[in-house]
Image (cartoon, rainbow, N blue to C red):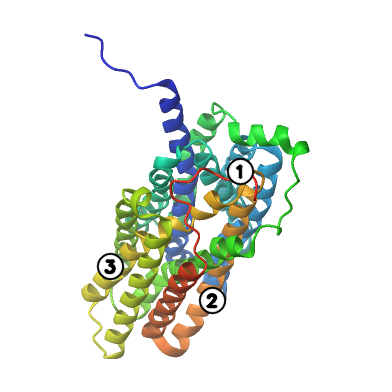
């Protein structure tokens, strides 16, 4: 008896989903590895707080430029072209950051790496959305964002090993250079993928329809796409990038414990995404996003209250952060990157996702500096309280400005 075969179009879609997810995985790795790399780099370059903040924010700042510009370019010149170009830039400047001999050179190289990362954020989810069927699109988009957690968890696991076994001057270079390997594999595979047929169709019809202009979309779409993601990144990056240093500087654990603890918290964010993936097409995006924001914020407030009562138990604090990350991953950590790709028409889709990415990274940078300031004035408990407030605000905004794209076809034009 002949064994059943998988249809060729399904095999193609699986490759599209995998290769698109690779860019998001690299994003999770690179944005998280900075939190680990800061520990040996601080020793080597004798960094003060401002320099640490600048280095932690460089990749985020680059992703603002990359997200916005690549989204516009992908809507004009196609998805595949930009998917290839951003990985080339990523490979070149990941190598440059690993070889840099001065602090400022590292910052500049990580800035350009961020441009490539931001570009992939704008294009990869858009590309997957345009190939997926409406009935299962939520699951496949969730798969893409699960890759972020895989990259983040991998960065902390690898970081803990490298930082403790390799000399400080070499450890951070190795951690930056490792990302080149999967990026090179992804570059080869992306050359073999087709252009989005939906984008091609709309490009040929462009002269027959009213041209879309950025900013002409209803305000509700832009608020829903941008503000919750800003608030998510304010909390997740602001807290996540500072967490290893905060855990160590508050004498809650050792260097290894701070890295592994942050990695465990990131792992539970990925488990939350796994939970959400199987429910997005049944429960919808908005319900999951609101629920995740709210429960995560409440958990962070509980942890803040515990620290204010001077109950500084590392295991208890870590368990609470893991729960908060699970709630965040099972809600906005998955949906904030999905909704913009589903509610805008084809000729604005990548632009809108890129703009939302850029605005979210502004939130991340603001979060890093604001939470660092709060920690200096109000200690770790203050950081948790402000992060919790951001999450609760995310729930409010998501519900008030809600648009549910679940089980709907992707829009091409606004009625």
Badge 3 density bin: few <14, some 14–19, many ≥20, Cα 10 Å? many
Closer to viewer: mark 3 or mark 1: 3
Q: Is residue 325 above or below residue 346?
A: below
Can residue 100 be seen at all in this image of the molecule?
no
The front one of 191 and 154 is 191
Q: Residue at x 37, y 48 (%)?
A: 281
Q: Position of residue 274 (x, y in %)?
A: 31, 51
Question: In this figure, which residue is indicated by the disc labeled 2?
Answer: 369
Q: Nearer the viewer, residue 283 or 299?
A: 283
Q: CA distance from mark 3 to mark 2?
A: 24 Å
Mark 3 or mark 1, earlier in chain: 1
Question: In the orientation shown, which residue stands out farthest toward the top?
Answer: 1
Q: Earlier in the sequence, mark 3 or mark 2?
A: 3
Alpha-carbon span between mark 2 and mark 1: 28 Å
Q: Quadrant of the N terminus?
A: top left
Find residue 198 and report its horizontal and vertical position in percent: 60, 35
* Residue at which label 1 appears: 86
Residue 183 in the image: state x and y as whole percent.
Answer: 50, 40
Mark 2 nearby-residue class (10 Å; few <14, some 14–19, many ≥20) = many
Can residue 399 be seen? yes
- Disc 2 + disc 1, Cβ < 8 Å: no
Q: Please provide percent x and percent y for residue 35.
A: 44, 64
- Residue at image point 69% right, 45% down: 73
Residue sitting nearer the eye, 294 or 103 = 294
Callout 3–callout 2 Cβ contact below 8 Å: no
- Name the residue beneath numbered marker 3: 323
Secondary element at tag 1 = helix
For label 2, the SS is helix
């Amino acid at each position: 008896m002949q064994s059943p075969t998988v249809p060729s179009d399904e095999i193609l879609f699986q490759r599209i989903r995998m290769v698109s997810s690779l860019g998001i995985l690299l994003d999770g790795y690179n944005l998280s590895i900075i939190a680990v790399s800061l520990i040996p780099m601080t020793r080597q370059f004798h960094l003060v707080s401002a320099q640490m903040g600048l280095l932690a924010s460089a990749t985020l700042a680059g992703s603002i430029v990359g997200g916005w510009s690549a989204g516009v370019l992908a809507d004009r010149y196609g998805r595949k072209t930009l998917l290839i170009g951003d990985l080339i830039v990523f490979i070149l400047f990941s190598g440059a950051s690993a070889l840099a001999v001065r602090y400022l050179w590292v910052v500049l190289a990580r800035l350009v790496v961020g441009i490539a990362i931001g570009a992939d954020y704008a294009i990869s989810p858009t590309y997957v959305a345009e190939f997926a069927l409406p009935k299962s699109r939520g699951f496949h988009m969730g798969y893409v964002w699960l890759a972020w957690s895989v990259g983040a968890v991998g960065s902390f696991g690898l970081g803990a090993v490298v930082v403790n076994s390799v000399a400080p001057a070499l450890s951070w270079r190795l951690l930056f250079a490792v990302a080149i390997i999967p990026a090179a594999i992804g570059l080869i595979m992306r050359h073999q993928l087709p252009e989005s047929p939906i984008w091609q169709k709309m490009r040929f019809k462009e002269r027959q329809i009213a041209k879309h202009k950025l900013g002409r979309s209803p305000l509700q779409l832009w608020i829903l796409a941008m503000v919750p993601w800003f608030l998510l990144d304010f909390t997740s990056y602001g807290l996540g990038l500072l967490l290893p240093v905060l855990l160590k500087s508050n004498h809650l654990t050792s260097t290894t414990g701070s890295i592994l603890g942050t990695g465990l918290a990131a792992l539970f964010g990925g488990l939350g995404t796994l939970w959400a993936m199987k429910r997005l097409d049944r429960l919808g995006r908005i319900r999951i996003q609101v629920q995740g924001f709210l429960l995560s914020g409440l958990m962070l407030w509980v942890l803040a209250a515990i620290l204010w009562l001077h109950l500084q138990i590392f295991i208890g604090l870590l368990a609470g952060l893991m729960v908060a990350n699970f709630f965040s991953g099972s809600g906005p950590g998955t949906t904030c990157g999905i909704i913009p790709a589903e509610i805008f028409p084809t000729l604005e889709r990548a632009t809108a996702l890129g703009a939302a990415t850029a605005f979210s990274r502004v939130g991340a940078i603001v979060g890093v500096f604001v939470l660092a300031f709060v920690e200096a004035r109000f200690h770790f408990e203050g950081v948790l309280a402000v992060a919790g407030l951001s999450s609760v605000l995310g729930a409010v905004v998501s519900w008030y400005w809600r648009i549910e794209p679940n089980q709907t076809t992707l829009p091409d034009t606004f009625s």
